[in-house]
Amino acid sequence: MNEAPIYIKKYSGELEQFSFEKLKKSLQRSGASNDITNSIIKTLGPQLYDGISSKEIYKKAFRLLKKSNSICASKYSLKEAIYDLGPTGYPFERLVGAILKNKGYKTQVGRVLKGECVTHEIDVLAEKDGNTFTIECKFHSNGKTVSNVKIPLYINSRFLDVQKMWNASPNKTTYLKQGWVVTNTRFTEDALNYGKCAGLVLLSWNYPEDNGISKNIDQYRLYPITTLTSLTKREKELLIKKDIILTQELLFATDVLKQLHFSTTKIEKVLSEAQKLCDIHPS
């Protein structure tokens, strides 16, 4: 490894000193053993240079990890895999709905609700313990785009408009309690501060600490199909068009795989990877 500091270019274009320790932790989070992790770092070290992009480092590490352990590689690719769910935000909304469902909420994706002033399309409507929550999802196809304070400001005004109409209705069966904003990248400091002040729940890739999107996906094994190394980019796109978003859903979608003319061998390979990734053992 080079002893002189190496500066890498982040998604934002900023330069940041490269940290082998940070890379090591990200590989270990995927489940990679110490031997595999150390081997990858040893191989990567001489290939790094000032100005190399964080994306290029990810690609190199991913290729090396895939050769050693494809399941760990799938987990390691999670952030990029979510970017690949685009270009529309609907698959991400489905993912967010699945996270909430696993937390005990009843969920609906894509609801239209009347506000006091105008009608609003709500990405995810969630209900739990007699309370209802409106969840707005801000999907970005790369890490350059962050959600600034304008986003929670706008979402809060929509929530308040819907809340007035909902809670004034004599026919309501639940109380519309709170608005959420969820993004797959990050919020600016002003956005976080406004969210706290306004009483909004904000959820991003790693916020709140130890309860962000990445943590929830790992906890409930809600890996999107774009993490699977046994599928080509085109095959992933075809499955998303068929509304197969999560790897878990593939285990019950054998007919869809056949409709897309996957061979028997291919189906077995894909389902085997899906079972291992979701830690589901066939009976």
Image (cartoon, grey):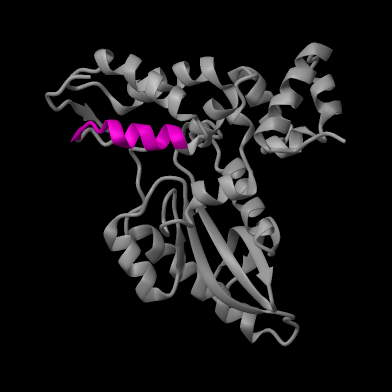
Magenta stretch in the rendered image:
15-28
* Along the viewing direction, whichever of 15 and 175 lies nearer the viewer: 15
Q: Residue at x 78, y 15 (%)?
A: 262
The percent position of residue 26, horizontal first and vertical second, equals 41, 36
Report the side of 5 relative to 274 (left or right): left
Which residue occupies 34% across, 59% down? Answer: 150
Q: Is residue 281 left or right of residue 91?
A: right
Q: Going by the picture, which residue comes out furthest to the front? A: 35
Q: Residue at x 72, y 35 (%)?
A: 244
Q: Is residue 129 above or below residue 240?
A: below
Residue 11 in view of the camera: no
**Percent of width and height locating residue 202:** 44, 62
Which quadrant would residue 113 be assigned to in this image? bottom right
Q: Is residue 277 left or right of residue 189?
A: right
Q: How many marks?
A: 0
Q: Would residue 23 be counted in the magenta stretch?
A: yes
Above/below status of 157 relative to 223:
below
Residue 137 image position (x, y, % from top left): 52, 53
* Viewer-nearest residue: 234 or 252: 252
Residue 126 seen in render = yes
Residue in the foreground of this view, choosing between 195 and 164? 195
Quadrant (top left, top right, bottom left, bottom right) of the C terminus: top right
Q: Quadrant of the N terminus?
A: top left
Location of residue 195 by image quarter: bottom left
Please state the horizontal and vertical placement of residue 147, each as a whole percent of the image: 36, 52
Q: Which residue is rendered at x = 31% and y = 28% of the image?
A: 54
Q: Is residue 241 depicted above or below 136 in this figure?
A: above
Instruction: Considering the whole magenta stretch, tell me its main secondary structure.
Output: helix
